Image (tube, rainbow, N blue to C red):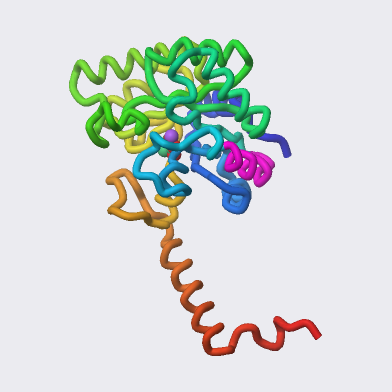
Amino acid sequence: TRRITIRDLQAAKERGERWPMLTAYDYSTARVFDEAGIPVLLVGDSAANVVYGYDTTVPVTVEELLPLVRGVVRGTKRALVVADLPFGSYQSSAAQALDSAARFMKDGGAQAVKLEGGQRVVPQVEALVAAGIPVMAHIGLTPQSVNAFGGYRVQGRGDEASHRLLQDAKALQHAGAFAVVMEVVPSDVAAQVTKALHIPTIGIGAGPSCDAQVLVWQDMAGLRGAGKPAKFVKEFADVAGVLRDAATRYGDEVRAGSYPAAEHEYQ
Ligand code: KIV
Ligand code: NA
């Protein structure tokens, strides 16, 4: 087995084949998703929320994400592992983006990085690509800009905003990005962007026309945090329920003295 490459993803777009992507933050779940045939795993800065319990993705750091990337890389044989560049690790300059990306590639073992933004991050994307680092772009609802947006709301709605989104996507493609994530944008706008680009688009709350889809795995599997899931989320399992039941039964059996039983003992 060899790892999926950005060429494989490009070829999938040319064949009209859709593909799934999930987030992963540790060795154990990355192994499971790799075995399930998920070709791309993102160590998202959503770790801020689902691993570290922050309210937004703004506070999470390279230092906090790096060990998660290492675990995911060690847990996978086939998946392309993408490391998310956190807020503050690439905005200042192309040089800063290179330093941060290099840490995720060298120390982390990631095969690609992702960053948020349109035209404003073109210099960063160009510098990374020139250095041989595959870059996944991310436009629409970019959570690192939550304070500028004034909340989590649909982006790219209306003529002007949808035109800007398309121009951003084209600029990122031209800068050398190998794929573009579109988060919470109207389906027709996402369809238009997908048609206009020769690189794959990856939707999350962007309708069915994107070349690929991504979800935070805890959302996908029903390991629910506080608050109700976003409209675009489909829970394919009730992992919170399964874990709660398992922990409850384990607790009950320990308290009752029925676990450990004879078969669990060493003589
Ligand atoms: O951090 C993340 O999980 C993401 C995906 C939702 C695209 O950026
Ligand atoms: Na992210």
Give the left or right position of residue 152, taking residue 16 as reference. left
- The answer to whether any part of residue 219 appears in the image is yes
Q: Is residue 74 magenta?
A: yes
Considering every residue shown, the one lying at the far right of the view is 267
- The answer to whether any part of residue 40 appears in the image is no
Residue 263, how many percent across, how many down?
71, 84
27 versus 109 height, above or below: below
200 versus 219 height, above or below: above
Closer to us: 21 or 148: 148
How many labels were placed on the picture? Answer: 0
Closer to us: 49 or 12: 49
Residue at image point 41% right, 25% down: 116
Residue 82, how many percent across, how many down?
56, 32
Give the left or right position of residue 252, taking residue 145 as reference. right
Residue 177, how many percent across, how many down?
50, 18
Point out the image quarter for the C terminus. Answer: bottom right
Q: Which residues are magenta?
A: 66-78
Residue at image point 58% right, 27% down: 112
Point out the image quarter for the N terminus. Answer: top right
- Quarter occupied by residue 70: top right
